[in-house]
Image: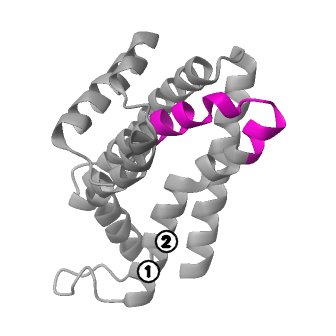
């Protein structure tokens, strides 16, 4: 499940093509069974986003202090890590049922591969406004505006990729993307509830 630099480069290039609504970007992804499993290994590329999420949760809980370690509380570290992983795998797991129910099983593997790489890019992009806020380089309203702009870009990219990989209508693709947003909102709510 080790992702090579060449595969990262190809997959990011394919993701950029999808951002520009070019279906030929799908050719950049390794659509094999090994590519499927390696796309889950790409979560390691989101480690910077996990660190930012951890710092942001510590700030929210009033525990982020200059003289204290970022990894000082095992419960917070574990809950944020589990939430991070859950946000990565929630839609691929839920899509097993959706793919079977709507006879989309032939397109399940390409959908998951592309979705995983879009999730990597999305988590990294969405960590930027939070990092700017943590560093004091952006006010909360400005960080929220950046987050909204990045989220719109990611949702549009996921919508196009869903439509292209599953071969479904625009409306059905939007429904699947909305389903993914709801799943991730549930994961975030559960994470925050566990943290208090």
2 vs 190, left or right, is: left
Quarter holding residue 95: top right
Residue 190 coordinates in the image, percent (x, y)? 63, 70
Residue 196 visible here: no
Residue 10 visible here: yes
Q: Is residue 86 above or below residue 107?
A: below
Q: Marks 1/2: CA distance?
A: 6 Å
Tell me what residue is drawn at x 18 percent, y 80 percent: 66
16 vs 195, left or right, is: left
Q: Is residue 114 magenta?
A: yes
Image quarter (top left, top right, bottom left or bottom right) of the C terminus: bottom right
Mark 2 Cα-neighbour bin, 10 Å: few <14, some 14–19, many ≥20: some
**On the image, numbered disc 1 is attached to which residue?**
78
Tell me what residue is drawn at x 35 percent, y 39 percent: 121
**On the image, numbered disc 2 is attached to which residue?**
82
Magenta-tinted stretch: 97-116
Tell me what residue is drawn at x 18 percent, y 35 percent: 6
Residue 48 coordinates in the image, percent (x, y)? 26, 58
Report the front residue among 57 and 19.
19
Residue lying at the far right of the rendered structure = 101
């Amino acid at each position: 499940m080790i992702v090579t630099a060449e595969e990262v480069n190809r997959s990011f290039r394919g993701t950029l093509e999808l951002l520009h609504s070019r279906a030929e970007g799908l050719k950049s992804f390794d659509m094999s069974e090994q590519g499927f499993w390696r796309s889950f290994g790409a979560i390691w590329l989101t480690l910077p986003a996990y660190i930012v999420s951890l710092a942001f949760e510590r700030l929210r809980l009033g525990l982020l202090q200059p003289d204290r370690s970022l990894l000082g509380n095992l419960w917070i570290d574990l809950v944020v890590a589990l939430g991070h992983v859950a946000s990565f795998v929630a839609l691929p797991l839920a899509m097993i049922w959706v793919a079977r129910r709507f006879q989309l099983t032939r397109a399940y593997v390409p959908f998951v591969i592309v979705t995983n790489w879009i999730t990597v890019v999305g988590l990294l992009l969405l960590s930027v406004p939070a990092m700017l806020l943590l560093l004091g380089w952006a006010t909360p309203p400005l960080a929220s505006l950046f987050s909204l702009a990045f989220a719109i870009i990611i949702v549009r990219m996921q919508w196009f990729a869903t439509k292209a990989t599953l071969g479904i209508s625009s409306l059905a693709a939007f429904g699947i993307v909305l389903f993914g947003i709801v799943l991730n909102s549930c994961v975030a709510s559960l994470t925050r509830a566990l943290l208090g």
